Image (cartoon, helix red, strand yellow):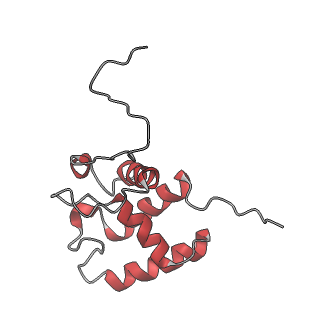
Amino acid sequence: MTTWAPEIWTGEVRRLLFGLIVKKFGSYSEWEKTALPGRGLDDEFKEFCETFARTVGAKSGSAVQHQICFALPEPENGKGSRWREQAQVAIMCKAAALEMGFISSKHLLELRADAPEEADSFSCVSKPAW
């Protein structure tokens, strides 16, 4: 028997997450570390992630931090992308983070998603036939 499990990471939950982060820990531009706010707030941030996970039914605070990492800017050299195989999740996280003011458009300048090789190709550079 399969039990129904509700979708945890909806747009509403992501917007709530990033809105609370901005309120409690500031926007990403204010952070001192890559994935932690710094400024003496790291332990409070980790506890926040644990509490948020329990509140929304996520597996752990690490699962919450994983969602946050998807919203972070890609490495400048284009290597080490955190989301090559999970582009949809990253796009949803980046959209919520942008909407709630955690990141700004300057954090999206190098955004690029490569489709798997077996996918149909589509180019936005050339004019579609329709």
Name the spot of residue 24 as percent of width and height, x first.
38, 70
The residue sitting at the left extreme is: 77
As drawn, the residue found furthest toward the right would be 1
Relative to 82, say whether 96 is above or below.
above
Q: Which of the pair 95/30 is nearer the observer?
A: 95
Quadrant (top left, top right, bottom left, bottom right) of the N terminus: bottom right
Q: Which residue sits at x=44%, y=64%?
A: 67
- Displayed quadrant of residue 7: bottom right
What residue do we see at 76% from left, 62% from top? 4
Which residue corresponds to the image point at 28% horizontal and 22% vertical from the top-left? Answer: 126
Examine the rendered structure and indicate whether residue 121 appears above or below residue 43: above
Left or right position of 56 against 107: right
Where residue 109 appears, as percent x and y from the top left, is 21, 46
Looking at the image, which is closer to me, 31 or 74? 74
Number of numbered discs on residues: 0
Nearer the observer, 84 or 38? 84
- In which quadrant of the rendered image does the C terminus lie? top left
- How far from the left and from the top, in percent, is residue 117? 38, 45
Relative to residue 105, is residue 21 drawn left or right?
A: right
Name, please, the residue furthest toward the front: 118
| 130 relative to 46, above or below | above
Quadrant location of residue 44?
A: bottom left
| x, y percent for residue 10 | 56, 54
